[in-house]
Amino acid sequence: MIHYFKVLGRSIREYQKASILTPLFVSCEVVLECIIPLLMARMIDQMSGESLMPIFQNGIILLIAAMLSLFCGAMSGRFAATAGCGFAKNLRKDLFYKIQEFSFADIDLFSTSSLVTRMTTDVSNVQNAYQMLIRIAIRTPLMLIFSMFMSFSISVRMSLIFLAIIPVLGVALFGIAIKVFPVFKRIFKRYDALNNSVQENVAGIRVVKSFVREPYEQKKFENASEEVRTDFTSVERILALNSPIMMACIYTAMLLVSFLGARVIVRSGATELTTGQLSSLINYGTQILSSMMMLSMVFVMLMMASECAVRIVEVLEHESSLVSPDNARTSVPDGRIDFEHVSFRYKEGSEQNALSDIDLHIASGQTVGIIGGTGSSKTTLIQLISRLYDVSEGAVRVGGIDVRDYDLEALRNEVAVVLQKNVLFSGTIKENLRWGKKDATDEEIRHVCRLAQADEFISQFPDGYDTRIEQGGTNVSGGQKQRLCIARALLKHPKVLILDDSTSAVDTRTDALIRRAFAEEIPDTTKLIIAQRVASVENADLILVMDGGRIIERGTHAELMALHGIYSEIYEMQTHGTEVA
């Protein structure tokens, strides 16, 4: 746990001052609260009935002590809230920044739903634990020690009652901890499953509704939710024992102190123990045993947060499988691409390759078309170019240099990818396009939109390029979304442009216009086009046909037609028969 504290402690940063001031004010509050019972005892013992002056004098001192205690308590609460919320903010920021460094393989390792849980629920639990740690966890032992010291200074014999009760509470607390800790570890895995169910449903809500699968999704969510409820219920049942055990011990101690203290006062004639001192002992006893109760709450919270801390530290300390090397290359000479006997597996130890013995050489400025059936690893092939994954065997070179020798940011700035699943973010069209180049001028934006055949429909919007795009681009059509994403990629002026089936939602005429614009406007850019339509790639300098992670045919349109293989079969089906979807 010390290691986890060190790792998480790095996120405190500018909130160190608030984190230090909180326990300081808590300490002052505890000292004042321990002095107040002594002042009350003195006031009670000075009540002779002859004058009200002692009551006024002691009352003023009590009022000042109470006000100071209240001030210290308020300040400790304020600084604890500042430190806790600031710590959580920094922790979420550190997690988010760390996740940005992850490769696709790292995301797959943790799963998206689990990462969301760690950034939300887990951080909230750690935040609450941290606030308790710097405030209540400081207050409780101090109160216990000071109150015990003060009670022993009044009567050793009476204080032994409190001392005898503490082990009983300790054993009960330890027993509860043993029971609930394993359940907490299981609960957060249940949370991951619950979040995964919600995420899948929301992301695929259109599919769910089109297939009328709401009852099935509801049942799946209910099962995940029921598992969380069951585990939490079992934990709460155990924790529910905490309060009655604590209260039973407190009331038992108070009864014993009151009874035995009264006997001592009567028998000694108030010489061994006074009425005021008995009152103080009762107050100190309440403080001691209440501190034990608070300690149990802190302990339970820390147990729950410890598992959250482990999950958070797992992410913070995870080393991405893809990192820029020392003395990395920061410039890409040209768009030449070479695959040198490349094989790739998504997981180490996997028996089956996603790609096998890919030997391919593409000259800078060439247009390459890639076709193949679903599962033929077309997308996997192009993901290796921008080093979203590392090869398992062989090497991928861009500009004659192994992609593993480049600075990742430099490489990806020169390799623009329009993915099959196009994503737009909430904001205006201009803001979305400037993801490609943050300082792009309005004229540059219009130019790339004309190349991508997007300027025409954008101009028809009432607000033009200032039209707001809803999250995910839900207020534009699939074809419009694809053209905007192509324009965004073109703004990067890349040396390599990859279109992963990104014109599937546009008509053949628009597709042809986009390809012609590429040929005329960016002749030096290497273009890789993954498509299902032969018409989208038939004019390419090189066409690859993939199947089972291998290149089974390659050549120009005329060369492949002459082979009378898979390519010519697809061509015949699409031009004279039923189009292949």
Image: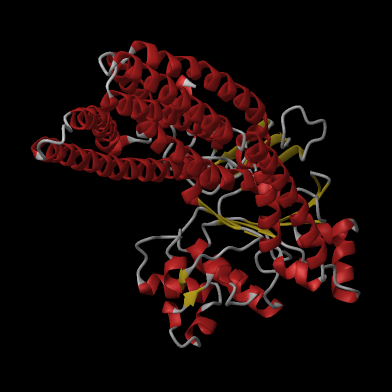
Please state which of residues 470 and 551 is positioned toward the viewer in this rendering.
470
Q: How many marks?
A: 0
Q: Is residue 355 left or right of residue 171?
A: right
Whether residue 385 appears in this view of the structure is: yes
The quadrant holding residue 133 is top left
Please state which of residues 576 and 75 is positioned toward the viewer in this rendering.
75
Q: Is residue 499 left or right of residue 34?
A: right
Colour convention: secondary structure
Q: Tell me where residue 140 appears, x and y as whole percent.
A: 38, 28
Q: Is residue 519 left or right of residue 22?
A: right
Whether residue 313 appears in this view of the structure is: no
Q: Residue at x 70, y 38 (%)?
A: 234
Q: Tell me where residue 284 appears, x and y as whole percent.
A: 34, 26
Q: Tell me where residue 39 appears, x and y as whole percent.
A: 20, 30
Residue 278, placed above or below residue 503: above
Please state which of residues 134 and 470 is positioned toward the viewer in this rendering.
134
Q: Residue at x 84, y 59 (%)?
A: 567
Residue 157, placed above or below residue 215: above
Please state which of residues 59 and 287 is positioned toward the viewer in this rendering.
59
Q: Tell me where residue 517 appears, x and y as whole percent.
A: 56, 71
What is the quadrant of the C terminus in the image? Answer: bottom right
